[in-house]
Image (cartoon, coloured by chain):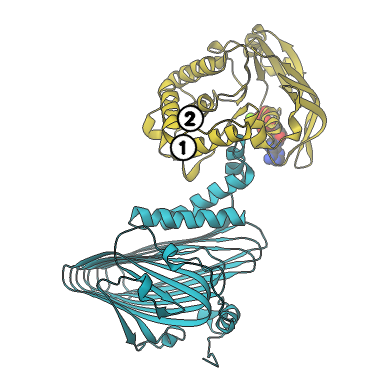
Chain colours: A yellow, B cyan
Amino acid sequence: MLNIQNLHAEVDGKEILKGLSLSLNAGEVHAIMGPNGAGKSTLGYVLGGRNGYAATSGSVTFDGQDLLELEPHERAAAGLFLGFQYPVEIPGVSNVQFLREAANAQRRNRGEAQLSGAEFLKLARAQAAALGMDAEMLKRPVNVGFSGGEKKRNEMVQMGILNPKLAILDETDSGLDIDALKAVGEGINRIMRAPDKAVLLITHYQRLLDYVQPDFVHVLAGGRIVRSGGPELALELEREGYGALAA
Amino acid sequence: MTVLDLPSARQEAWRWSDMEALRAAAASPQAPAGINPADLFLDIDGPRLCFVDGVFEPAHSRPGPVEVTRQIAATDHPLGSLAIGEGWALHLGAEHAATCIQIVHLGTGGENHVPARILLADDAVATLVETFAGTGWANRLTAIALGKGARLMRSVRLVQTGGFVSIRDEAEIGEAASLVSIFLGAGGMGSRIDGALTLTGKGAFAEMGGALLTSGTQRQEAAVAVRHEQIEGTSRQIWRAVAADQSVASLAARVEVARGAQQTDGEQSLRGLLLQRTATVNLKPELEIFADDVKCAHGATVGELDRNALFYLQSRGIGEAQAKALLTHAFVTDALARIGEEPVREAFAADAAAWLEAAL
Ligand SMILES: Nc1ncnc2c1ncn2[C@@H]1O[C@H](COP(=O)(O)OP(=O)(O)O)[C@@H](O)[C@H]1O
Ligand SMILES: [Mg+2]
């Protein structure tokens, strides 16, 4: 589904990704772990197409398409979802308006019929309920005044509504208490555990992986995948730290 | 009019004004506007008045309580004093209500001047929507006097395709009376929205604000002074300016609190958004306070669209232009949210959205 080959990328003229290769098949959950500053968020932004995060060489294909050729919104329409480490507050735009425009923009891009207001609300309410988010929060401005945990739940509500093929979730577990962590973990499993979908979980800690069992674990350090393995690798990292592995 | 004696940019209060655009509009030849005035009214019940090139058009009007009369301007304001001749007057007696009076001003070129007088007796209520369309120089003087407990809600949209609109409001707001005037500049014309509001009674409320949207080489401007003369008055000046291309949007807002006008609550919020770095937003907040028990919140900032927010929207599937439009619309929303009637607020929001679609 996603095939990253020898990817190099720069931020502000500084090379952050230095030959990263990674491949995900449909039906798989991969975890990327690594120390602070390793380039995990950078990888997410490069895949999402953020301005200023330029791939300088290498290739990324998504379902056979050249991902790097696409505009950010086209990547979303193609089925890519980026869960933000720091979800953005947008005063003056309600969650409902934002997500309805997003869902319909994706549908337009794919040549699908638009959702009516009523259809959208039904979908949004169901996803909010499944994530334990008060439906009233759908009416509030996007993430404004939300706690850290509410913001991350909101990311999962968005994922549920947009129903992507590939989710790249950047530290979706950080800043969550145990209840929120459980809700988010269950959300990921419910929405994304399917034979035609895949997940790339970027995380710092083992604890989310107790809820969302990865098929593969990779260590990102110095802009490269330095080691890959099964779920046991996460436990080993938890025990021994990154120092030894990244060396 | 042959020679226009206009203010010059050397005068501080007029330094951002585009008198060249005003002159050019005044000298422009009349040409059919291709606009049916009937299409400029919102689909809301109530009295209607239509002025084409400053001349009352009975065919498109049903004035109700509004009178069409000739008036002499009682002001020394340099533009307002030019607004003499046929105009309109609304005098409402105590506890009378006149809701959703719509006034359409359509210009086809050249200059036109319309004076207006609004007098609300104690506890009278009126709502008013004005629309400026077409082209040419539309010059208006509106004198407002509100008796005890009277309330006026006024919404004014400037959607001329070109030319210039100059508006001078002079208002006296009596005890516990309330005046809210919200302006939207979302056309291709230049503008000067100029107001002097005086809170003459205890516990009065005065608000003048709105949004100016400029593009190309257009210049729009609002210059408002609010004066608190009595105790327990409240005033709000909430303005948003969005400037694209090489355009200039300017906001000057002044609050004066007279000696003895204790427990005044004033709020002034001036914010500018640059859609390109070649555009300019000028802000000039001013406070002049001679009382000691006064709360005056004020803020003035100019910025660009938030890059993080833009990428967040794009990453969810919204294209760049649409994402910018959403964020820009959100930026002006607070100013337009002050409009009381929902259909009017929606119509103004739609005008702003149409402007954004064209500008982005
Ligand atoms: N916008 C930016 N401008 C400059 N440097 C950046 C920017 N974003 C990230 N970096 C740098 O890139 C490196 C990787 O950062 P990041 O991808 O956020 O790491 P991680 O998510 O693994 O903690 C760090 O050295 C960081 O300082
Ligand atoms: Mg990070």
Q: In this view of the protein, which residue sits in the foreground, A185 or A130?
A: A130
- Three-letter code for the amino acid on which mark 2 is drawn: Asn
Residue B133: percent from left, percent from top? 49, 69
Task: Tell me if mark 1 has few (under 14), some (14-19) or many (20+) residues whose alpha carbon lies within 10 angstroms of its own.
Answer: many
At mark 2, the secondary structure is helix
- Please tell me in which quarter of the rendered image ligand 1 is found: top right
| Mark 1 or mark 2, whichever is nearer to me | 1
Say which residue appears at 35% left-offset and 89% top-offset. B72
Q: What residue is drawn where x is 35% and y is 88%?
A: B74
| Residue A21 located left or right of residue B68 | right
**Disc 1 and disc 2 in contact, CB within 8 angstroms:** yes
B169 left or right, relative to A71: left
Give percent across and percent down for residue B164: 53, 75
Q: Which mark is residue A154?
A: 2
Which of the chains bears the disc numbered 2? A
Is residue A15 depicted above or below A244 in this figure? below
The answer, for residue A186, to whether it is visible in the render is yes
User: What's the amino acid at mark 1?
Assistant: Asn
- Respond whether the residues carrying marks 1 and 2 are from the same subunit: yes
**Residue marked by disc 1:** A95
Residue projecting furthest to the bottom:
B3
